Amino acid sequence: MVEKLKEFDLGSYIECWGKLYVLKVKISKPFLLDGILNMVTREGTKVLSYANKRSDEKIDMTLIVGARDVGELTDVVRDLLEIEGIDHVSYGELPYKAIPLKYYPLRFHGMRIVMFGEPVLKSIVGGIKKEYGKTAGPILLWNIGYQGGLGVAKEFKEKYKFENIEDYFAMLKLRGIVLGWFVISHVDIHLKNNIIVLRMTDNWECNMVKGKFKTPQSHFIRGIISGFASYILGKSMVAKEIKCIAKGDNYCEFIILEKHKSGNQYASTV
């Protein structure tokens, strides 16, 4: 039985020192910009980001500010309104904690990590399918994933130099969990026939459309698996999805075959 993993909210474990606010300032004297930044940055408030919109000689300034409490921010607002050339100041609380911007970029075991939230990924996948069509869209996603799978396998080979193929798939399972790709729950490798059966739960690509389709919907992840297996085995391999959470199954299951045995390599299933 596979142990159910607990959800981990990264934002809850980052050092926070207050609440997050959006501060809007209307300025009629542009030379005040630098002074405003200096005024807002105090012991109890910090400017995390800002942007300006200019119209003639007037400026609308938007600042993302962290404050220990709302009292600290109201003091800032009061002082700003006393300055000639600042016409209006308003603020609103954002539903997030203020995170100090001390570290960039994010790394895992020395490797740079670039994170995208599920709404972004859903928009990318849906946008590609819409722009390129029901046939070309999945093919493009598969090829993007395939190149990514090759890259992951190449990195593993150079870094870990394992002797056994199963060790590479064990490392892929770890990478998938750490980066939020998927949870591999079962791998069965048949080297005699060059066939691999791989089962995963919570595949993000299919989870976004869970139970909404009658056919398997893993294209990007299926490409990653195909590229990964191809590089590790040194043969052209193609993953076919025979079970999928997008069509109501409890997990996604893939059969990874040699390309010449797989038929249409872009077809999602056997």
Image: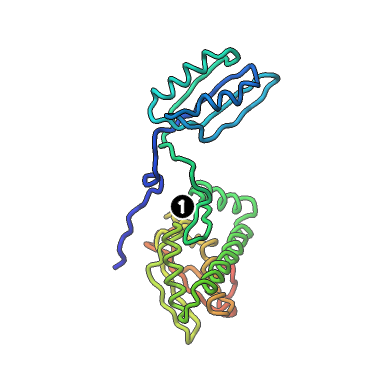
Residue found 58% across the figure and 23% down from its top: 35
Which residue is label 1 attached to? Answer: 208
| Quadrant in which the N terminus appears | bottom left
Along the line of sight, the residue nearer the viewer: 227 or 10: 10
Seen in the picture, residue 83 relative to 224 is either above or below; the reply is above
Work out whether residue 247 can be spotted. no
Residue found 58% across the figure and 79% down from its top: 235
Image quadrant of residue 29? top right
Seen in the picture, residue 81 relative to 17 is either above or below; the reply is above
Image spot of residue 99 (x, y percent): 44, 40
For the residue labelled by badge 1, is the local secondary structure a helix, a strand or a loop? loop
Q: In the rendered view, does 73 fall on the left or right side of 228?
A: left
Image spot of residue 166 (x, y percent): 43, 77
Q: In the rendered view, does 138 fall on the left or right side of 70?
A: right
Q: Residue furthest bottom?
A: 192
Work out whether residue 166 can be spotted. yes
Residue found 60% across the figure and 26% down from its top: 34
Q: Of the residues shown, which amino acid type is indicated by label 1?
A: Met
